[in-house]
Amino acid sequence: MSSSLLQIDSGYSLPPIEPVIHKDFAELYIPYYDEELDVPQGETHFETVYNQLYLIGHMAEKAGYKLLSDCPVCYWEKVNTKKKVYLPDITILKSKNPAAAVFQEVVLVGEIVSGTSRAKMEKDTVKMFQLNELHGIPEFLLIYPDPQDDRILDWFVLSGGKYRKLIPQKGRYERHSSIG
């Protein structure tokens, strides 16, 4: 592992993490299934990911990045102690190599907030939010597909080591994204 530290927006540093190289994602993970909570994703979750991937993928490609969905990304479980693989719903990488995805290559993470279970909702909105903020991921999205929920999208950008929620103006977000 490299000894150089990565400077995080708020001023603290994390060492880079070496990837867990994945050769066949299909044998390792069940798409749209949360192994940690042992719950499948609902149909709404699947449809939302599927529908958003085209738009987000197009933006990522134009910016020279790689889009992943429910693919493994290595993070520190507890800062600098143990690495752990998470599977964000939407990940945009600087690298074109999805088999070696590590937090320092991530530009944006998006989570589809599932209303199928309270534990899954908390994982998306609290745990994944805090994990990505701690690791200095520049942008974080929470997408709410449930038509009963008044929220549609919460978009956060890293500023001073903390996520700041963007507020849409007249129903639109100002062009702020690192992906275009």
Image: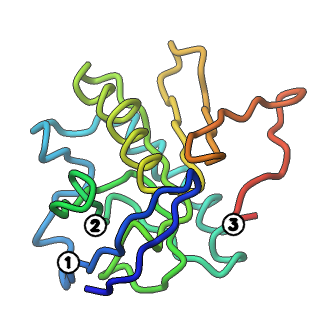
Closest to the observer, 124 or 40: 124
Q: Nearer the viewer, mark 3 or mark 1?
A: 1
Q: Are marks 3 and 2 in contact (CB under 8 Å)?
A: no
**For residue 14, what is the image quadrant?**
bottom left
Q: Earlier in the sequence, mark 3 or mark 2?
A: 3
Report how far apart the C-alphas of labels 3 and 1 lie in the structure. Answer: 27 Å
Locate residue 134, reporting x and y percent.
Answer: 42, 48
Locate residue 83, reporting x and y percent.
Answer: 19, 64
**For residue 104, what is the image quadrant?**
bottom left
Question: Which residue in the protein does label 2 denote?
Answer: 74
Residue in the picture at 31% in, 26% down: 122
Q: Is residue 74 left or right of residue 30?
A: right
Q: Earlier in the sequence, mark 2 or mark 1?
A: 1
Question: Of the residues shown, which amino acid type is indicated by label 2?
Answer: Cys
Label 3 SS? helix
Question: Of the residues shown, which amino acid type is indicated by label 3?
Answer: Met
Neighbour class for label 1 at 10 Å: few (<14), some, many (≥20)?
A: some
Neighbour class for label 2 at 10 Å: few (<14), some, many (≥20)?
A: many
Closest to the observer, 127 or 78: 78
Locate residue 124, reporting x and y percent.
Answer: 36, 35
Question: Of the residues shown, which amino acid type is indicated by label 1?
Answer: Val
Label 1 SS? loop
Residue in the picture at 22% in, 25% down: 119
Question: Which residue in the protein does label 3 denote?
Answer: 59
Report how far apart the C-alphas of labels 2 and 1 lie in the structure. Answer: 7 Å
Q: Are marks 2 and 1 in contact (CB under 8 Å)?
A: yes
